[in-house]
Image: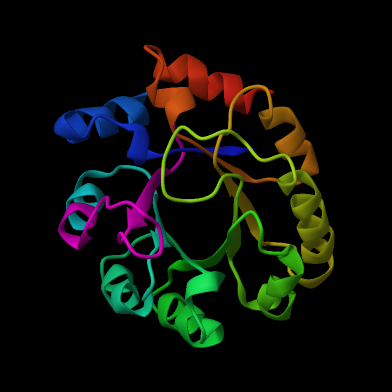
């Protein structure tokens, strides 16, 4: 069944614990955290202390998406904290195999994130080593952006190869996800839908999660 991962980037930061409890009670499967350093992307979000506090109160898996220039600085710490999913950008990391192994030695599901303009073929050499791949369907850095349709073809290519080389690979999509594009994303082979403003911009989180899941 499709997993729904609300992005806390769109939550009310002043009431973050309340928002987390509310989204969990609404039926979310995963909590998605976008970590931005102001260098790889032009924005700043959660630091390590906030990640730790979120993990301590979370009752569902936590998914940390590192939009940072030096992801290796974070990986050991996130592994020791038993973060459930961690992805870093291929565009920001030279030694991909090494960093995947750092995460996996702690039992973390290790993933690579790809920007919209990065060809999915560039990740094929390490596809057998991955637990999941995060396909960005907007250019990372800000919430509330419009979905970029070219990702459908990327997902289809990725799903086809994964079925041959790594059938357990999960495909996650983040950016502009809503009830309109969710059906095609799911039929293309997506396993995890990340949605921010579509959920948190509503006054009924449960209904919005169901709208994504039931398409």
Membership of 38 in magenta stretch: yes
Within the image, what quadrant is residue 41 found in?
A: bottom left
Say which quadrant the N terminus sits in.
Answer: top right
Where is residue 112? Give x, y as percent.
55, 67
Q: Is residue 161 left or right of residue 140?
A: right
Within the image, what quadrant is residue 196 found in?
A: top left
Q: Is residue 202 left or right of residue 48?
A: right
Where is residue 145? Give x, y as percent.
51, 35
Q: What residue sits 73% from the left and 29% below the top?
A: 183
Q: Is residue 161 left or right of residue 66?
A: right
Q: Is residue 173 left or right of residue 144?
A: right
Where is residue 170? Give x, y as percent.
63, 56
The residue segment tinted magenta is 28-51
Say which quadrant the C terminus sits in.
Answer: top right
Q: What residue sits 48% from the left and 51% below the top?
A: 140
Q: Up-down: is 173 above or below 20?
A: below
Q: Up-down: is 84 above or below 180?
A: below
Q: Up-down: is 31 above or below 40?
A: above
Q: Up-down: is 199 above or below 41?
A: above
Q: Please tell me which residue lies in front, 59 or 63.
A: 63
Q: What residue sits 26% from the left and 66% below the top?
A: 81
| Colour pattern | rainbow
Q: Please tell me which residue lies in front, 186 or 202.
A: 202
Membership of 33 in magenta stretch: yes
Where is residue 115? Give x, y as percent.
59, 58
Q: How many discs mark residues in the rendered view?
A: 0
User: Is any atom of residue 27 visible in this view?
Assistant: no
User: Is any atom of residue 196 visible in this view?
Assistant: yes
Within the image, what quadrant is residue 132 found in?
A: bottom right
Q: What residue sits 34% from the left and 64% below the top?
A: 39
């Amino acid at each position: 069944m499709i997993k729904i991962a609300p992005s806390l980037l769109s939550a009310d930061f002043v009431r973050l614990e309340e928002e987390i409890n509310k989204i969990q009670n609404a039926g979310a499967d995963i909590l998605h955290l976008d970590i931005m350093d102001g260098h790889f992307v032009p924005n700043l979000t959660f630091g390590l202390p906030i990640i730790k506090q979120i993990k301590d109160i979370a009752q569902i898996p936590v998914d940390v998406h590192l939009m940072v220039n030096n992801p290796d600085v974070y990986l050991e710490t996130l592994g020791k904290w038993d973060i459930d999913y961690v992805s870093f950008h291929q565009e920001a990391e030279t030694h991909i195999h090494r960093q995947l192994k750092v995460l996996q030695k702690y039992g973390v599901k290790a993933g690579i994130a790809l920007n919209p303009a990065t060809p999915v073929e560039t990740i094929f050499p390490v596809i057998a080593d991955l637990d999941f791949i995060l396909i960005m369907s907007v250019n990372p850095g800000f919430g509330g952006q419009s979905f970029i349709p070219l990702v459908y073809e990327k997902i289809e290519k990725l799903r086809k190869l994964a079925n041959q080389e790594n059938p357990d690979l999960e495909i996650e999509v983040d950016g502009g996800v809503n009830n309109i594009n969710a059906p095609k994303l799911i039929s293309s082979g997506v396993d995890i839908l990340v949605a921010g403003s579509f959920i948190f911009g509503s006054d009924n989180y449960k209904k919005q999660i169901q709208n994504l899941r039931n398409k």
